[in-house]
Image: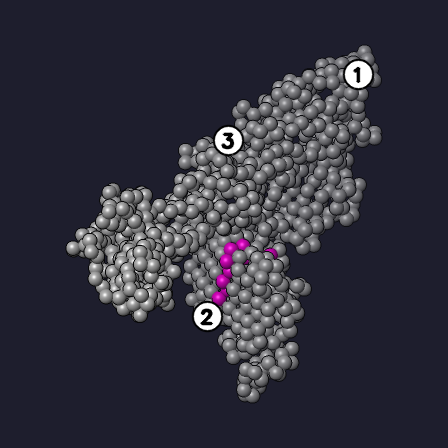
């Protein structure tokens, strides 16, 4: 039943539980929806669907957050679709089942499996980079769902998924296929790291996430600064103690409605249109209310030469500013009282060629042409519509910005700016680029309706350009026609016109290149005064002087040619990026400011960029790592949106930007929606380097300093067996590892040096610690980490080999050397003669040591045991080093120096270590010589246990020496008193 195998239940449930499970499933399938199908529930759903985003207990939003492109501002529990935050009373109906079916979860685990059938499971995961797991659809009970790996994906099929916990790693995906409703019921939490994609780009009607009492959703940052929707669907909870949190830069389409808390970070972009609302209602199983047309908006040119057809656009507006349209089937009836007026072409349903026509609207917009060949001010109206509009029709110019009468002034002669092909509308172009525009001086043939030349030959025409949006032109900017500047006019004016010399051809066309140094939505105007001239039908009389006037066939957009991202230093100066040389920019993770500047084709700023209404929106996104080679992408965060900058013309600025990695990064600018005033994207958005970012500091995450004699906890000076281990991380301001440090061609990464200091008492200059313990390691960074594993560190004796010490509280610290940006390890908590350092874990007990031999004697037929001990300098004299249990004793180190009696003996022994500083009796010996006599011998000590001895003759030697005697010991005839020099 519903795809659950009885064997799976047999492993986890008793017979009673099995029967209960079946009953529950049958009940659930009969219920079929989360909301009981009653009017009260759907009324509540419809009520909260008017807003889309509600956090009833608390709603918090970060800087730069928007909804439907409108800035979110104010306090309350919901941001309305227009952006203002208010408080709305809302009911939160419970969903079914009222309790999470905990008794049904649990079962086998599945990893990277496709088409998982319905049933009960333990852990289901997509594990590994590009891993993929999918469901076949139905009803599932899952203990844990985990997506762990870069670009790992779990694909849901339509059905119901009861899941205790979902964990999503960075750059992981939840997708839905095939299309259909997926309902996810969460008992505990959904936890997502950064760059999480849940039904990204999918229909919001295909996903609802229900949260039970106490459940949480915690999604991290979407760090790429992209306009890609990374969550599409609904999250709903009727419980006050639920928490829903999204980090920075997330793009969300759909609804988040909770009786608890909703919090979103900086630069969150919500999309919640009328269409989205209908999709949400569809998902909840509540039929949406019938949409309505608030009013019709008509857009038309104010005047036109009558040999042209005026384009009339009708919009069915669903909200006050007509940013949302009524997209159901609609039609209007248009009437023009003038008998000579005709409706033609476009979306006419019937009535073409008459002054009354029916026009169909598709997705809220209909287009139709209006003609009046004989000329005159031609009014028109919407006389009827299906469905009816709530409010009267409103008429505007072709851009929808300037209101006016529903009329077109058709003139039988005039001027008209068109595309270079002499007929079409002027296309949008780029700032600073020449583009062809034709000026036509025409009159209407009243018999044929055709455009005929009104003027031919050289003329001087007064021309001006009107800045429609932004509404004010910027002084110092130029609009040129054929290399001649024309007048600049603010919106609603065309008085400022300057003369331009040109030549009309036989068709009344003058084609010249146009060029605008700035950006914006523009309208061209022109006038040409013609003197009195002979009448065409009766040359004996003159026609009066006339002034031909006209404007462009359409408003056109001049877009940014180039959008660049530039970082600002602490003085607000533009920073020139560096890579493997030159000054670094600043520490990774620290806040800085960037501007996005619009430039024309000549590389000059376009100062009107950002003055539009509404202002053009921009984003900066990660493009690539410029340095080092093969660098990892970091996290780009904006705590503030972009606003026009007063210091740099044509630029928008964002402060408190952070980049988490070291190196140099390429950012790329982006127009929101990849569009400028409806004219499309900029011509060029090149990768713009910012950096070099460097580590904020180095930290030691793990370390140990161990004496050469590990168990005895001491080291001899000069003994090369001191162990130093440490792990250093190059981190950003937040303490996060910067993986690009030392990677690839990142030259100038840090070397590390070890220094030492005795803490009690403090060593002084005469102790020469800075020269006796001075170890360094070259840079060996791997993904921002350097591991030191030094087993042979040594604290040297003084240069003259004289004894000093002991130093029983020696601390070792690390310093950074040869670092490109002079970064250091923090904190510095050890003061040494070699400079401040960061202390490692552990302490050294350093002793100046030596080995000493005793003179020995014994019977010639027995082995002669060697007597030896280790001594150390205690500051006043040498004494037994009773800590020494680590010095090895080697018979091979014994050697005869002098054997005047030619004794036949050899060293022997088992080579054990000293015990408490003494050689265990019998561990080393000279084999029985079986003859009487004396010999002198030495023990070849390791360098750290040698000593500058001096014998009776004043000769120096390093290894300890002694006399051995087989037989009756009688001393030396020449020695009266024997004192051993130590």
Badge 2 element: loop
Residue identified by numbered label 2: 213
| Left or right of residue 562: residue 725 | left
CB within 8 Å, label 3 to label 1: no
- Hey, which residue is sitting farthest left in the picture? 976
Magenta part of the chain: 189-200
Residue identified by numbered label 3: 649
| Residue 535 circle label | 1
Q: What number of labels is visible?
A: 3
- In this view, the residue in front, 201 or 164, is 164
- In this view, the residue in front, 651 or 949, is 949
Upstream in sequence: badge 1 or badge 2: 2
Upstream in sequence: badge 3 or badge 1: 1
- Hey, which residue is sitting farthest bottom in the picture? 15
Q: Residue 39: x and y, percent?
A: 56, 70
Q: Nearer the viewer, mark 3 or mark 1?
A: 3
Can residue 85 be seen here?
no
């Amino acid at each position: 039943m519903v795809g659950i195998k009885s064997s799976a239940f047999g492993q986890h449930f008793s017979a009673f539980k099995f029967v209960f499970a079946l009953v529950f499933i049958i009940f659930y399938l009969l219920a079929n929806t989360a909301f009981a199908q009653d009017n009260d529930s759907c009324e509540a759903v419809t009520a909260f669907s008017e807003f889309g985003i509600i956090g009833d207990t608390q709603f918090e939003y970060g800087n730069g957050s928007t909804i439907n492109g409108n800035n979110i501002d104010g306090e309350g529990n919901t941001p309305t679709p227009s952006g203002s935050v208010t408080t709305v009373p809302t009911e939160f109906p419970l969903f079914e089942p009222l309790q999470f079916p905990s008794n049904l979860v649990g079962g086998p685990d599945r990893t990277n499996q496709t088409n998982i059938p319905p049933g009960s499971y333990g852990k289901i995961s997509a594990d590994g980079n590009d891993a993929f797991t999918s469901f076949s659809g139905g009803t599932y009970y899952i203990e844990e769902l985990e997506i762990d790996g870069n670009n790992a994906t779990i694909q849901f099929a339509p059905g119901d998924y009861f899941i205790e916990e979902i964990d999503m790693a960075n750059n992981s995906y939840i997708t839905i296929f095939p299309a259909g409703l997926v309902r996810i019921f969460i008992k505990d939490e959904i936890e997502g790291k950064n760059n999480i994609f849940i039904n990204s780009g999918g229909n919001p009607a295909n996903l609802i996430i229900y949260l039970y009492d106490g459940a949480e959703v915690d999604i991290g940052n979407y760090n790429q600064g992209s306009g890609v929707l990374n969550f599409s669907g609904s999250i709903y909870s009727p419980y006050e103690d639920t928490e829903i949190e999204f980090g920075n830069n997330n793009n969300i389409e759909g609804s988040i409605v909770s009786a608890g808390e909703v919090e979103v970070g900086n630069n969150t972009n919500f999309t919640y249109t009328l269409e989205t609302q209908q999709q949400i209602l569809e998902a909840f199983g509540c039929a949406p209310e019938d949409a309505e047309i608030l009013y019709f908006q008509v857009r038309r040119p104010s005047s036109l030469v009558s040999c042209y057809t005026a384009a009339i656009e009708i919009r069915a507006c669903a909200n006050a500013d007509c940013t949302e349209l009524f997209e159901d089937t609609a039609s209007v009836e248009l009437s023009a009282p003038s008998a000579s007026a005709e409706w033609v072409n476009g979306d006419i349903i019937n009535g073409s060629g008459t002054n009354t026509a029916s026009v169909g609207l598709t997705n809220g917009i209909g287009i139709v042409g209006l003609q009046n060949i004989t000329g005159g001010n031609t009014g028109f109206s919407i006389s009827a519509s299906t469905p009816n509009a709530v409010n009267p029709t409103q008429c505007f110019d072709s851009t929808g910005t300037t209101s006016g009468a529903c009329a077109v002034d058709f003139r039988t002669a005039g001027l008209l700016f068109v595309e270079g092909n002499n007929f079409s509308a002027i296309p949008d172009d780029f700032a600073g680029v020449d583009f062809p525009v034709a000026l036509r001086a025409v009159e209407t043939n009243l018999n044929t309706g055709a455009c005929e030349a009104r003027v031919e030959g050289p003329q001087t025409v007064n021309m001006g350009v009107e800045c429609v949006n932004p509404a004010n032109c910027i002084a110092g900017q130029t609009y040129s026609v054929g290399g001649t500047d024309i007048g600049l006019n603010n919106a609603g004016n065309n008085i400022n016109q300057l003369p331009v010399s040109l030549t009309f051809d036989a068709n009344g066309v003058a084609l010249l290149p146009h060029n605008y140094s700035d950006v914006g939505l523009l309208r061209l105007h022109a006038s040409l005064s013609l003197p009195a001239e002979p009448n065409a039908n009766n040359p004996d009389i003159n026609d009066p002087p006339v002034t031909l006037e006209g404007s462009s066939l359409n408003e056109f957009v001049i877009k940014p040619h180039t959008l660049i991202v530039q970082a600002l230093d602490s003085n607000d100066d533009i920073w020139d990026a560096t890579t493997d040389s030159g000054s670094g920019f600043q520490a990774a993770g620290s806040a800085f400011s960037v501007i996005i500047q619009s430039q024309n084709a000549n590389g000059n700023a376009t100062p009107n960029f950002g003055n539009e209404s509404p202002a053009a929106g921009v984003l900066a996104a990660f493009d690539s790592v410029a340095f080092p080679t093969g660098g990892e992408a970091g996290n780009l965060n904006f705590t503030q949106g972009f606003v026009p900058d007063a210091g740099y013309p044509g630029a928008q600025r964002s402060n408190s930007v952070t980049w988490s990695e070291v190196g140099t990064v390429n950012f790329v600018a982006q127009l929101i929606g990849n569009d400028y005033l409806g004219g499309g994207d900029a011509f060029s958005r090149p990768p713009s380097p910012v950096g070099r970012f460097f580590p904020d500091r180095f930290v030691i995450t793990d370390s140990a300093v161990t004496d050469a004699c590990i168990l005895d906890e001491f080291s001899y000076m000069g003994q090369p067996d001191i162990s130093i281990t440490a792990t250093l991380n190059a981190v950003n301001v937040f303490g996060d590892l910067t993986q690009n440090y030392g990677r690839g061609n990142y030259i100038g990464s840090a070397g590390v040096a070890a220094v030492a200091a005795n803490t009690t008492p403090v060593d002084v200059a005469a102790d020469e610690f800075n020269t006796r313990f001075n170890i360094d390691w070259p840079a060996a960074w791997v993904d921002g980490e350097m591991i030191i594993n030094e087993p042979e560190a040594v604290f040297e004796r003084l240069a003259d080999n004289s004894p000093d010490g002991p130093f029983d509280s020696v601390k070792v610290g690390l310093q950074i050397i040869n670092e490109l940006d002079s970064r250091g390890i923090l904190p510095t908590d050890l003061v040494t003669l070699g400079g401040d350092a960061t202390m490692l874990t552990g302490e050294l007990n350093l002793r100046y040591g030596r080995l000493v031999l005793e003179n020995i004697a014994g019977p010639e037929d027995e082995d002669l045991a060697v007597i030896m001990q280790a001594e150390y300098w205690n500051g006043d004299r040498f004494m037994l080093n009773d800590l020494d249990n680590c010095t090895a004793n080697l018979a091979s180190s014994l050697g005869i120096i002098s054997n005047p009696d030619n004794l036949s003996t050899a060293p022997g022994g088992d080579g054990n270590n000293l015990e408490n500083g003494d050689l265990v009796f019998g561990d080393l010996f000279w084999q029985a010589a079986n003859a009487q006599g004396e010999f002198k011998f030495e023990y070849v000590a390791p360098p750290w246990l040698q000593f500058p001895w001096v014998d009776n003759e004043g000769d120096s030697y390093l290894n300890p020496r002694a006399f051995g005697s087989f037989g009756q010991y009688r001393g030396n005839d020449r020695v009266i008193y024997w004192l051993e020099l130590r």
